[in-house]
């Protein structure tokens, strides 16, 4: 526990204050942190400290800019604040009220949004994959979705940098896609569940591999190697996980960035010239205003459009950066359906990170009658999560539920991460209800398209076949799950059909940037965070280049 | 990691090995011993040094496999084998180190031959084990499945011990020979190969650890030079690099001990450090493994001494 009893509750008061911030690597430790006055016009304000915000905060500070990173969430100390308890750890999730509708409403919370310094990466599953190169031009090369204004070769380079910065542990040879440099750390040992995926894939004649993960397989700095207890999605209490909280955020602070935790940004202000002038934020019980020369929004696919829409004013009545009318539109999630079964022998699927092996076969195989791709990974839900799945998707209750739970150690599963297509009808809008800060609550509307449904059915069939081939019994399909989010402020090559350009700079307001999962024009069939981080690193470089040319 | 191989076949194989060893032992025991005469002291001294080398290797294997197989929960009964063989090899080596008699000892011979064979069979099993895993002979399986190097080390210990017995048993009036080849050369070549094998093993495991600490490059750079120097001496003229070889082997022997220190530091880097020794000792870098370099370097020094005492070129 922290030496200072006042600080034992991360929600009681901000921790990054008084010239210091928590040193997450040392129990009770502190890092010196530079602080700025509200009236001081800082070079950059970054809203959100996750996969998109974190790298920008660090890189911009390292380039000598004055930077403040705001996050509505708490500044956790993993060594002290994280319990091995699925329920307690819900404190990492964004559970503020939201309204969901559409034919397939997205269940919001733990599965898709974090609220913490470090963002969703504090409880993400660490799967760190690269896009298939063609996806950056899915419209022109594959005939669906939209093209990105980025070149895959340049992205390949930034992926490598992201992998290095996050010390990704990956296989010596990755079976799909163009050559990539060796992962900084070697892949982790497969657990029982991962081996079953591998056997199934081999039986189907598909390639498989150990999954590249953002948790170290050998010591790195103050991070000990992973201890395979499998609490990753509930916060890693060893700091083996390379979340933003233990990587870019401390780097940023060391380079002079300031972090403001428990600081909810409610509105971006613009001046008479139409440029952003700073942000209104709520911290320590009252609203404050921070002046800034540039504002970067990185609150993820719901909170980013919500903030842009909520910042509407006389000059921008439809919200900021919204001349295209696309802010909030083209929300995408990923299909996350699963097939589960029971093995005769013990598997102990919860040991280790949940997705230790993967097959991307259907991301790279185009002989199929739907658009988009998907991969599937080994699974290892912890007991409460598993009970929820069995009760919810399988409708087991009472004695049958208990019986199912008794087989926990023999259970196996495969879970997909599938590409859903962009559709303007899937969107984030504002309701008139307000939340605890008095801010308008977002409405999240989502319906699966026919292509989405075809892809899901294909994947369920394939995963079921794979489990069948390894002798799993009592197989059942979990048909209703989705996970990662993207879209709602897409990047593109012209102002009419996109919100930001390739540099994540908004077309409408030159000193307003958006750099997080919301800039994705298409979702791809892999988990998004490495792509977000790579783009964030690229944006930092672009800002440097633009600043040099006096074009900021 | 689980494995579901039936133990039946292992039991069969083990009894075959044991049978072969016992038979071999009986043959050795029945042979007419050389007339016990005073052996040149140097030969016996070299033999005892080899015993010491074999013992060091055996001790390294014993502790290492005890920890590793405890980690694997002894889920397969055959996992007790290296503990038994390594203990026996260690005991035989202690006995041999203390024994200044110039003749082979039947029980030691038996044990050493057994260890040599068991190690070979163990390597076979470990290869078989890997081949059954999804991915087959892949990096992933080489990293995490049953290691090939561990049983090979017990085999080396046995072979070194066995050669030490052959030294004691050599003709008193002639330079010691094994299979008609000067003993120093045989032992030198074998040790050099053993060193290279051990380098390969530590190279593989340090690659698995992503060489996260620069010191992890030491065991893949220093011992190969020792192996090359020793190999050159064993195969060619010995006098040229004698001094350099000796010093390099000595440094390699020290490196083995230093490695233990480095690994202890590595254990401290696990979650909870040494306070959490029950977990980190098992999951961290193997503390008893590096001294196998020491054992082999000692054998190399013995070989070098033989080569210099009985120059044949
Ligand atoms: C359970 C789970 C598992 C996942 N597993 C994986 C995986 O294995 N691999 C992978 O690639 N991806 C995974 N993801 C997805 C990945 O975490 C996200 O895609 C990624 O973190 C999004 O980055 P971001 O920067 O857009 O947003 P986030 O990382 O979510 O960061 C946004 C931050 O902004 C803050 N914020 C938002 N609005 C405001 C505001 N107005 N004021 C102040 N702060 C604000 C939030 O508190 C939050 O901390 C997972 C996600 C979850 C939830
Ligand atoms: S399994 Fe590894 S990454 Fe996951 S919580 Fe445990 S130590 Fe952290």
Image (cartoon, coloured by chain):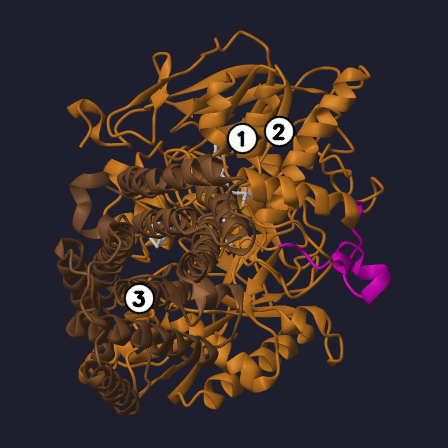
Chain colours: A orange, B brown
Name the residue located 21 percent from the left edge and 73 percent from the top edge. B111
Tell me if residue A53 can be seen.
yes
Residue range highlighted in magenta: A130-151
Residue at which label 2 appears: A296
Q: Is residue A27 above or below residue A161?
A: above
Chain letter of disc 2 in the image = A
Which one is in front in this view, the residue at disc 3 or the one at disc 2?
Answer: 3
Q: Does the residue labelled 1 lie within 8 Å of ligand 1?
A: yes
**Residues at discs 3 and 2 both on one chain:** no
Q: Nearer the viewer, residue B123 or A158?
A: B123
Q: Is residue A164 above or below residue B177?
A: above
**Residues at discs 1 and 3 both on one chain:** no
Circle 2: element type: strand
Q: In this view, does A37 lie to the left or right of A533?
A: left
Residue at which label 3 appears: B170
Q: Residue B148 location in percent, x, y?
A: 41, 67
């Amino acid at each position: 526990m922290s030496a200072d009893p006042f600080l034992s509750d991360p929600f009681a008061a901000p921790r990054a204050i008084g010239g210091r911030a928590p040193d997450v690597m040392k129990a009770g430790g502190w890092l010196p942190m530079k602080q700025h006055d509200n009236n001081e016009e800082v070079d950059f304000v970054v809203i959100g400290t996750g996969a998109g915000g974190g790298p920008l905060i660090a890189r911009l500070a390292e380039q000598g800019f004055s930077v403040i990173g705001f996050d509505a969430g708490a500044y956790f100390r993993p060594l002290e604040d994280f319990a091995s308890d699925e329920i307690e750890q819900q404190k990492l999730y964004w559970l503020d009220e939201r309204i969901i509708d559409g034919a397939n409403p997205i269940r919001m919370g733990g599965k898709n949004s974090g609220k913490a310094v470090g963002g969703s990466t504090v409880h993400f599953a660490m799967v760190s994959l690269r896009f298939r190169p063609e996806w950056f031009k899915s419209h022109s090369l594959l005939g669906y979705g939209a093209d990105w204004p980025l070149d895959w070769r340049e992205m390949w380079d930034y992926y490598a940098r992201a992998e290095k910065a996050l010390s990704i542990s990956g296989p010596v040879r990755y079976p799909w896609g163009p050559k990539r440099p060796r992962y900084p750390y070697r892949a982790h040992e497969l657990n029982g569940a991962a081996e079953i995926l591998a056997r199934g894939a081999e039986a189907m004649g598909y390639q498989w591999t150990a999954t590249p993960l953002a948790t170290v397989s050998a010591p790195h700095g103050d991070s000990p190697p992973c201890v395979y207890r499998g609490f990753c999605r509930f916060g890693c209490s060893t700091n083996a996980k390379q979340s933003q909280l233990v990587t870019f955020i401390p780097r940023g602070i060391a380079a002079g960035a300031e972090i403001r935790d428990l600081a909810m940004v409610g509105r971006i202000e613009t001046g008479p010239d139409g440029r952003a002038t700073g942000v209104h934020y709520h911290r320590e019980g009252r609203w404050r205003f921070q002046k800034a020369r540039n504002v970067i929004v990185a609150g993820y696919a719901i909170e980013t459009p919500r903030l842009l829409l909520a910042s509407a004013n006389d000059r921008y009545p439809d919200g900021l950066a919204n001349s295209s009318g696309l802010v909030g539109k083209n929300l995408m999630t990923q299909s996350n359906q699963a097939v589960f079964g029971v093995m005769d022998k013990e598997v102990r699927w919860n040991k280790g990170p949940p997705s230790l092996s993967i097959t991307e076969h259907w991301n790279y195989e185009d002989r199929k009658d739907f658009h988009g791709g998907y991969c599937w990974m080994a699974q290892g839900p912890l007991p409460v999560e598993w009970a929820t799945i069995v009760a919810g998707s399988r409708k087991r209750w009472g004695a049958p539920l208990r019986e199912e739970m008794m087989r926990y150690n023999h259970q196996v599963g495969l879970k997909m991460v599938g590409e859903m297509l962009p559709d303007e009808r899937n969107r984030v809008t504002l309701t008139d209800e307000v939340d605890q800060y008095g801010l308008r609550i977002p409405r999240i509307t989502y319906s699966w398209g026919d292509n989405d449904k075809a892809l899901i059915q294909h994947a369920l069939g394939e995963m079921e076949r794979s489990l069948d081939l390894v002798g799993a019994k009592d197989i059942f399909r979990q048909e209703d799950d989705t996970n990662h989010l993207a879209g709602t402020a897409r990047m593109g090559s012209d102002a009419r059909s996109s919100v930001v350009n390739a540099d994540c700079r908004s077309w409408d307001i030159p000193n307003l940037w958006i750099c997080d999962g919301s800039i994705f024009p298409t979702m791809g069939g892999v988990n998004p965070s490495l792509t977000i981080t790579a783009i964030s690193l690229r944006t930092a470089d672009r800002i440097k280049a633009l600043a040099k040319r006096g074009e900021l | 990691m689980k494995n579901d191989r039936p133990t039946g076949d292992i039991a069969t194989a083990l009894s075959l090995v044991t049978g072969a060893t016992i038979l071999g032992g009986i043959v050795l025991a029945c042979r007419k011993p050389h007339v016990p005469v005073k052996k040149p002291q140097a030969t016996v001294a070299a033999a005892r040094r080899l015993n010491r080398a074999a013992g060091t290797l055996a001790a390294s294997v014993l502790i290492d496999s005890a920890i590793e197989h405890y980690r694997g929960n002894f889920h397969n009964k055959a996992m007790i084998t290296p503990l038994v063989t390594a203990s026996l090899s260690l005991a035989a080596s202690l006995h041999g180190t203390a024994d200044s008699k110039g003749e082979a000892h039947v029980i030691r011979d038996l044990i050493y031959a057994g260890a040599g064979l068991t190690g070979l069979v163990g390597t076979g099993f470990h290869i078989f084990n890997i081949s059954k895993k999804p991915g087959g002979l892949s990096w992933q399986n080489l990293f995490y499945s049953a290691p090939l190097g561990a049983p090979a080390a017990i085999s080396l210990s046995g072979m070194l011990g066995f050669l030490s017995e052959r030294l004691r048993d050599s003709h008193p009036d002639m330079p010691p020979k094994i299979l008609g080849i000067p003993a120093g050369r045989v032992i030198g070549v074998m040790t050099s190969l053993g060193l290279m094998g051990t380098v390969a093993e530590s190279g593989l495991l340090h690659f698995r650890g992503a060489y996260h600490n620069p010191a992890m490059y030491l065991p893949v750079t220093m011992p190969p030079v020792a192996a090359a120097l020793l190999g050159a001496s064993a195969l060619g003229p010995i006098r040229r690099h004698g001094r350099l070889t000796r010093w390099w082997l000595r440094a390699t022997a020290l490196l083995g001990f230093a490695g233990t220190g480095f690994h202890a530091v590595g254990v401290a880097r696990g979650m909870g450090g040494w306070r959490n020794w029950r977990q980190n000792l098992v999951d961290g870098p193997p503390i008893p493994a590096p001294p196998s370099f020491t054992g082999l370097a000692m054998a190399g020094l013995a070989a070098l001494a033989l080569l210099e005492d009985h120059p044949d070129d």
